[in-house]
Amino acid sequence: MSGCNLLWSERRKAAIKARAKILDAARSWFNRHNYIEVHGPVLIPSIGHHPNTFEVEYFDKKACLTQGLQPYAGVFASNFGRVYTIAPVFRAEKATTHRHLTEYWRIEAAISHSDLDTIMRVQEQLVSYICKSLSKEAQKELDILQCDAERLGRIRPPFRRLTYDTTIKTLQEDGFSVQWGSKLEWEHEKHLSLKFNQPFFISEFPVDIETYFLQSNPTKPELSLSVDLLAPEGYGEISTGGKPTIRKEELLRKMKEEEIGQAERKWYLDLREMGSLPYSGFAIGVERFAQWICELEHIKEAFAFPRSMDGIYP
Amino acid sequence: MSGCNLLWSERRKAAIKARAKILDAARSWFNRHNYIEVHGPVLIPSIGHHPNTFEVEYFDKKACLTQGLQPYAGVFASNFGRVYTIAPVFRAEKATTHRHLTEYWRIEAAISHSDLDTIMRVQEQLVSYICKSLSKEAQKELDILQCDAERLGRIRPPFRRLTYDTTIKTLQEDGFSVQWGSKLEWEHEKHLSLKFNQPFFISEFPVDIETYFLQSNPTKPELSLSVDLLAPEGYGEISTGGKPTIRKEELLRKMKEEEIGQAERKWYLDLREMGSLPYSGFAIGVERFAQWICELEHIKEAFAFPRSMDGIYP
């Protein structure tokens, strides 16, 4: 064995180093703001057959791979107030775009007794801090990646706050045939994202296109207490968040509407009993965030051994 | 839903906070010593049916859950020199002891152009730094856990360095019927561990009881370049490490001896071609380490939602 045939390019190494600096800056921000670092489990109880979930043979049973801290976040937030995690998550989504990995890392946080306004403020501070930190601490890497460190230095709060309602109107005005109630497609995200040079929020997506566990807006029950953060410059969504409901009847009703079996989610309902104070939380996709920060063409550049629908090798 | 029925005990919260401080101190040490933070994949190619490995349905194929950074560590070390990772790993071991989880986190490091002496020096510095940091920064948590912070303040390099050979002799002198060539059982580990009030190393285990990928000692080919770190006070092994071989013929010979199919490990052999400079590495089990630091009776106390052979809930 000749020992050293295939060393990585300076570009590849710079992307991995920049990703490390993003994580380091994130932890530094959380530490300064007295968040407790927690780790939820990767192996979670089976949720029955679900197209986006990987199944694991767990001795003589089935388990699933986590899609995020969310099922456990409320328990942590109830006990510690403010928590964060940086950990891998898994999505069996059949997507082969420049923005999809089946295994990726997330920066997640949960804050008890908080609402959408809080998690927007936290994210604009956190993201601005990370960008500023990278503009100073990762100049060498950003140079190698031929991207503009100064643009990151200019990211600062407050970020623009759009609602889903106004977003749909904007898209219609700009000539898209999108209707109220439909999901934002990549072409919509990209179009909006190209309008801005700062990250921006879109909040209160319709209940029908959001995940079942989010609370509805008390005064507009057709809207969910949800908020995404989008990167500018055409990079699109980098974070998703919201305020899960702690009202069991609301949860059960939404599960029924989405035909989610109560038996399969008993573990989830039991978790809600384990100290679910009201809380809000968000999850930033590390590799999508790095893709924007480092202006990477493909998300695979942001992870050393990326996994996608194409397969696992090596 | 009443919101807040089952908040955790102060003890449970203290253990989770102490674990977070261990990780924080570890990262701080690595950052000060210019290690690059990396993440290997959790989903790895199938290694065929293996009793300690969890299998995942990966679209129409099979994949496995990682047991550690090792397959990828050499590639990272070749490219960056010094790297570390803090990430979850998985072992389908059928064990229900007070020291076994099926899902646990590891602090792993790999250093190019290094040998056993280097990884022992690194670990004694790293572990002492973490202990000292906890003795100062986690006094409140250690008080709640009713464990002695001062004993952690006294942990300092150098740690005692035993070899497997002298360890077997010591055990025989102490009345154990263990023979050279056999694995150290928990009763042996515990006995040795109770003799010390500082962590200690045991190095150069026989090739026949070690993993196939480690290099043999050039002058004593029956011994592998392996080293474990054991905690004192009866807590036993907290880390494992060694110097993997970069000689393809040695690797192929050992795979053959252990009846490991080359076809199933083609991905592993291919990784060896991706920049395998000589390196050594080690892996500290976070929850075992926390168990010792915090004097926890059961390893389950060191993880908020522990997974074991008993099952996954919630």
Image (cartoon, coloured by chain):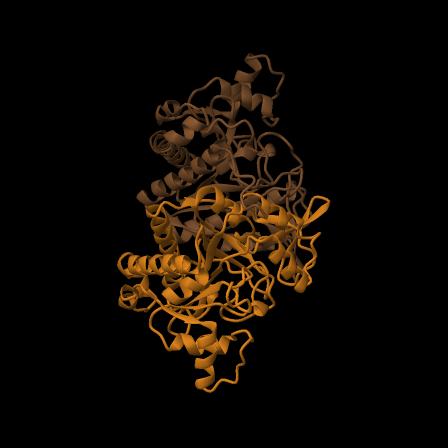
Chain colours: A orange, B brown
Residue B219 in sight in this render: no
Taking depth in this image into account, of B277 and B192 the one nearest to the observer is B192
* Residue A37 horizontal side relative to residue A256, left or right: left
* Residue A213 horizontal side relative to residue A173, left or right: right
Residue B234 in sight in this render: yes
Residue A214 image offset from top left, x and y in percent: 54, 60
State the residue at coordinates (53%, 78%): A180
Q: Residue furthest bottom?
A: A175
Taking depth in this image into account, of B30 and A254 the one nearest to the observer is A254
Taking depth in this image into account, of A260 and B192 the one nearest to the observer is A260
In the rendered image, the vertical position of residue B256 relative to residue B166, given as above or below: below
State the residue at coordinates (46%, 29%): B294
* Residue A156 horizontal side relative to residue B214, left or right: left
In the rendered image, the vertical position of residue A284 relative to residue A192, given as above or below: above
How many numbered discs, if any?
0
Q: Residue furthest right?
A: A60
Residue B245 image offset from top left, x and y in percent: 50, 43
Residue B313 image offset from top left, x and y in percent: 64, 43
Residue B62 image offset from top left, x and y in percent: 66, 56
